[in-house]
Amino acid sequence: MSIKNYILRQKALIEGYKYNFFSGGKNIKTHKNNTSVIYFEKKKFYRKYSFLKEGINKITAERLGLIWYCKLNKIDNKKIIINYQKKNKFAYLDINKIHGKKIMSWKSIDQNYVYLKRVLKHYKKILNRKAKTQIHGDLTLDNILFQKKNLFILDWEFFNAKKNFWGYDIVYLFLSAVCLPFMLNKTFSKKEEELFKKLWKELIRLKINKQLLFNPFKFFEKNIKSDNILKKSFKLSKSKFFPFVTNNSHKEKILKIIRSI
């Protein structure tokens, strides 16, 4: 963050405290993305806010993404979005707490397999097949809440990214399921390999774009760098997107598995 942006942010924070904007809330740690989050436990809602241009754009995109996603799910978005305000140098979005179970994306694919299958079923059910569609842009298990019968996808800050191939987010999710755990554990068992094959075969049967299916790392890296919305976040924090920080030898192993299917 530049000195100028830091000073502007500090001034805005002072104004926020003056008007009890943060009163009763607890700060939540987030990725480096020019936005901040507070949780209000008594009223059970989250407030995302920013005083920086890029952060304001992300909050605006998240609201639009939630409205779009709620419509697909036939959910009244007013039950999710409590309030939204946008001014020249400030924006915030209040979101009701959504109940559900979070699954750690860093756990191995054999632990998360059943959840990945549920997301695929959900995706196919709600999103009509089109040549190009809106994308989440960063779909990992960390951005999904699992309920007894349903699930809910969170964090639509990249909703204003360019439309992309149907299946983009599912391919990204399944690939993350064998990359993120490897970063932590440095292991990839035969069982994990076989489960990954089973998931990837399902994507092949869906006839998703071949570039996306058979050279996914290259596809995502190229797309993220060429999309104005995604590129800005990539420049801010390279680690936000796992394809750029996955070990090259592991990438080659995954590609070898994909080519063998």
Image (tube, rainbow, N blue to C red):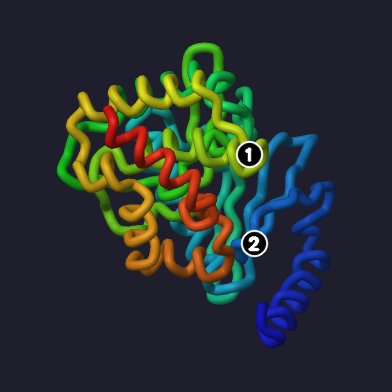
Q: Which of 57 and 17 is in front in this view?
A: 57
- Residue holding disc 2: 32
Q: Which of 1 and 150 is in front in this view?
A: 1
With 84 as the anchor, is 219 left or right in this view?
Answer: left
**Up-down relation of residue 121 to residue 33 (above or below):** above
Q: Position of residue 86 (x, y in %)?
A: 53, 64
The kind of residue tagged 2 is: Lys
Which label's residue is closer to the chain start, 1 or 2? Answer: 2
* Residue located at (64% from left, 61% from top): 32
* Residue located at (27% from left, 53% from top): 163
Quadrant in which the N terminus appears: bottom right
Q: Where is residue 162 in the image (x, y as percent from the top left)?
A: 30, 58
Q: Where is residue 145 in the image (x, y as percent from the top left)?
A: 56, 28
Label 2 Cα crowd, 10 Å radius (few <14 / some 14-19 / many 20+): few
- Between the residue at mark 1 and the residue at mark 2, the CA separation in whole angstroms equals 25 Å
* Residue located at (63% from left, 39% from top): 186
User: Could you say whether the residue bearing mark 2 is in a helix, strand or loop?
Assistant: loop
**Up-down relation of residue 32 to residue 47 (above or below):** below
The kind of residue tagged 1 is: Lys
Q: Position of residue 65 (x, y in %)?
A: 41, 47
Q: Which mark is residue 186?
A: 1
With 206 as the anchor, is 88 left or right in this view?
Answer: right
**Up-down relation of residue 141 to residue 165 (above or below):** above
Quadrant in which the C terminus appears: top left
